[in-house]
Image (cartoon, rainbow, N blue to C red):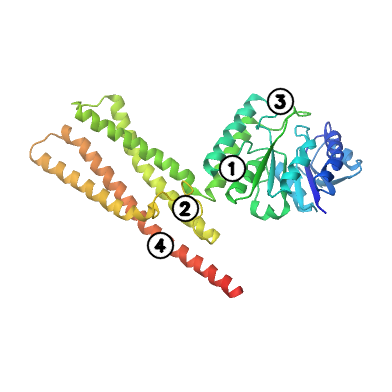
Amino acid sequence: MTTLSIVIPAYNEEGGIADITGRVLAVKPALAQVGVSELELLVVDDGSRDQTAQIVGATEGVRLIRHPVNRGYGAALKTGFGSARGELIGFLDADGTYPPEYLPQLCEKALDGFDLAIGSRMAGAESHMPLARRLGNLFFAALLSLVGRARVTDSASGMRVFKREILERLYPLPDGLNLTPVMSTRAIHEHVRIAEIAIPYSERVGRSKLSVVRDGSIFLQSILWTVLTYNPVRILGLLGLAGVGFASLVAAGLVGARLSGITSLGPWGVAALYGALVLGVTGVSVFSLGVTFNYLVSLFYKHPVRQGLFGKPLLKTPLDRHFGWLGLASIAAGAAIGLASLALGISGWEISRLWLYLLGSAMLTLVGVQLVINWVLLRVLDELSQRESQAVAAQRSAGA
């Protein structure tokens, strides 16, 4: 026997709460056909100031839980999760935008080997979502697919069914509207098995509580910060590579200009050179920071680094193992260019012919020092990580 607990968070939803609870209760026969024998419906009234709680309290087959004051969408959902009895837990909004008639399909996925089934508003079914929100959801889905290396079409869907046993892996979850993108981000990085079902999306009953700009910025921050707690180098590494890539392009352009006989730089050339110097040094620093954070994350989770920039190593040995000799080589190249420029200056060359080489020398030296410092730090963190892994393995062996 499988029980499905549906949680509906409600805040001032007197206009639509009776309709949505009735529609949820009406899918019970369809749920039985896919193997769900019992349906538990919980409505968490999140400090409503209208008649929402009274309407729910008078509805047979619905369990009412009340927050004395408004605590937020995510807080209401988590209260419901904690009170649910089912092996499967689902949720949807109280405003009638999500179709409870698709709950059997989501449950079927959850009973067919998937841990989390998401009703996707962006997977091709009919949708009445406003254009601004549609564009925002497309952006967040693309961002999560990029940083999480997993295809997701609707990272913020508010209609889901999941197995109770994965809750521990998904927590902590925020109290606000950003619970859903954070849940999606954590699920991907916890290697939760996810399925998406295309669902239609309707216009809500009553006024929307979502602010595209304010809540959109919160969604963006939530996704990025959550990724940083799992795989920092995925974000910081990509930013670092972008900076180094720009510097490399500018350097190649300067070499090409010199070979073509161009010896002076205009305003745009000077701006590009300045940007290359700043972004080049910053890029190396940010990339190194991402790698360092990954080791710290591995120490926190007590197992080796599990993600990485591209998901699988491109070299036989991790790139950070090469930071030492790369740093020394960069310092040596910078010193050689600096000494050669000094010698040329002493021999009579004007500074106007040498300043670019001196800038290059300074950049190479700074980058080299940064790489050597990070190599030393990473070797210490690697040693600590290995000790932690061996200690955990020894404890498991002793327990066995």
Name the residue type under label 2. Answer: Phe
**Real-space CA distance between mark 2 and mark 1, rounded to the nearest whole angstrom:** 18 Å
* Mark 1 vs 4, N-terminal side: 1
Q: Which mark is residue 293?
A: 2
Q: Are marks 1 and 3 in contact (CB under 8 Å)?
A: no
On the question of residue 181 being in view, the answer is yes
Q: In 3D space, how far apart are the residues under numbered discs 2 and 4 (Cα atoms)?
A: 13 Å
Q: Would you identify the image quadrant in which residue 213 lies?
A: top right
Earlier in the chain: of badge 2 and badge 4, it is 2
x, y percentage for residue 284? Answer: 37, 45
Q: Residue at x 47, y 53 (%)?
A: 294
User: Left or right of 81: which side holds 228?
Assistant: left
- Badge 1 element: helix
The image quarter in which residue 376 lies: bottom left
Numbered badge on residue 222: 1
Image quadrant in which you'd find residue 71: top right
Going from N to C along the chain, the mark reached first, 1 or 3, is 3
Disc on res. 336:
none
Pointer 4 local density, CA inside 10 Å: few below 14, some 14–19, many at least 20: few
Mark 4 to mark 3: distance in Å?
Answer: 54 Å
Which residue, given by chain and number where applicable, does mark 3 sit on?
128
The answer to whether mark 2 and mark 1 are in CB contact below 8 A is no
* Amino acid on which disc 1 is placed: Ser
Q: Residues within 10 Å of mark 1 (few under 14, many from 20)?
A: many
- The disc, 2 or 1, on the residue closer to the chain's N-terminal end is 1
Q: Considering the image in quadrants, where does the N terminus appear?
A: bottom right
Q: Which mark is residue 380?
A: 4
Q: Residue at x 66, y 43 (%)?
A: 195
Residue that appears at 47% across and 46% down: 310
